[in-house]
Image (tube, rainbow, N blue to C red):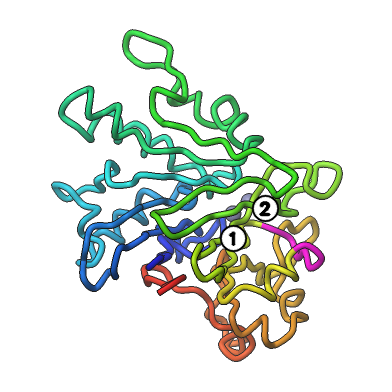
């Protein structure tokens, strides 16, 4: 079984729902059996991520991520970063430092327990110099590099796609570029979404990442997916870099009814949005385990 739990479902500037980061867990059986997990991955970890994770681990079903009352970052085996906005990467410095210094007794265990940082190559190529090196680039005694904190998996574009990686034994995750910020033209600033695939059955779940409404690229993915998580902008404005709710409303009903909206602003409970529960699957809920594949 593969599950997804949002630490938060809010926009970058949400004050009520935390930012849209998620915990992905691959299970040999199911969470109810509380068996050991095949894989545990964070999908983005923004500025509110550490506090949102701390709140999540107070729930009994996530207590395995806790040690001495704190988040046990050593339990998180993988970290995928979609892009370098702070609501997706702002918590990584804390994760890196606490995994390295507060996780393990011996240096050997430390090395083997380094989490695997996964990103498309153009994100990986810039994450250190553009984002992480300011806080992580120096250690007592030496200048630090990304490898001091993480093992890395850089996904390389091929003729088949933009790269993929494995979760547990049964799931593949493929990345695709998203039309988020345009410096000059579509796809010219690195940002990615994910398709989760059950290797045996071929079933897929789409996680949009941050993107504008991109019907041409997304439509085939929407059609074949059993479940869709899509970012949404409730109050459109000039220069918007997310799909607006009105754009998403133009999708066919069969697509909308399997679409869970996330990355929403703090006005989600305005009565004007009550209709969303009828138009779409729902506004995604934080701290709820969604089953991607049973
Ligand atoms: Zn975002
Ligand atoms: Zn963004």
* Side of 204 where 145 appears, left or right: left
Q: Quadrant of residue 60?
A: bottom left
> For this rendering, which residue is in front, 200 or 37?
200
* Side of 276 where 292 appears, left or right: left
Q: Is 212 in the magenta?
A: yes
Ligand 1: image quarter: bottom right
Q: Quadrant of residue 270?
A: bottom right
Q: What residue is at 29 percent from the left and 35 percent from the top?
A: 113
SS at mark 2 in the image: strand
For disc 1, the neighbor class at 10 Å (few under 14, some 14 to 19, many from 20) is many
Tell me residue 269's x, y (percent). Answer: 52, 80
Q: Which mark is residue 195?
A: 1
Q: Which residues are magenta?
A: 211-217
Residue under label 2: 176
The quarter of the rendered structure image containing the C terminus is bottom left
Tell me residue 153's x, y (percent). Answer: 51, 36
Q: Is 104 in the magenta?
A: no
2 or 1: tag closer to the N-terminus? 2
Check the image and name the residue furthest to the right: 184
Q: What residue is at 61 percent from the left and 83 percent from the top?
A: 280
Mark-to-mark CA distance, 2 and 1: 8 Å
């Amino acid at each position: 079984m593969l599950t997804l739990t949002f630490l938060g479902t809010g926009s970058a500037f949400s004050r009520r729902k935390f930012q849209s980061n998620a915990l992905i867990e691959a299970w040999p059986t199911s969470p109810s059996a509380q068996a050991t997990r095949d894989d545990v991955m964070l999908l983005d970890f923004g500025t509110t991520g550490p506090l949102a994770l701390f709140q999540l681990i107070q729930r009994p079903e996530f207590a395995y991520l806790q040690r001495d009352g704190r988040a046990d970052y050593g339990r998180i085996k993988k970290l995928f970063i979609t892009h370098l906005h702070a609501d997706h990467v702002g918590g990584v410095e804390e994760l890196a430092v606490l995994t390295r210094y507060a996780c393990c007794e011996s240096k050997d265990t430390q090395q083997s327990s380094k989490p695997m940082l996964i990103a498309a190559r153009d994100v990986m190529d810039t994450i250190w110099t553009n984002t992480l090196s300011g806080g992580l680039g120096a250690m007592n005694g030496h200048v630090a590099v990304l490898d001091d904190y993480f093992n890395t998996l850089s996904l390389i574009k091929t003729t088949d796609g933009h790269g993929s990686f494995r979760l547990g034994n049964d799931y593949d995750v493929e990345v695709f570029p998203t039309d988020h910020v345009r410096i000059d033209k579509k796809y010219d600033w690195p940002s990615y979404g994910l398709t989760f695939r059950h290797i045996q059955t071929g079933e897929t779940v789409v996680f949009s990442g941050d993107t504008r409404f991109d019907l041409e690229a997304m439509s085939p993915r929407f059609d074949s997916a059993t479940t869709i998580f899509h970012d949404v902008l409730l109050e459109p404005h000039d220069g918007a870099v997310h799909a607006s709710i009105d754009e998403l409303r133009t999708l066919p009903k069969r697509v909308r009814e399997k679409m869970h909206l996330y990355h929403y602003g703090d006005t989600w409970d305005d009565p004007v949005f009550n209709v969303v529960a009828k138009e779409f699957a729902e506004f995604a809920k934080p701290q709820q385990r969604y089953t991607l594949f049973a």
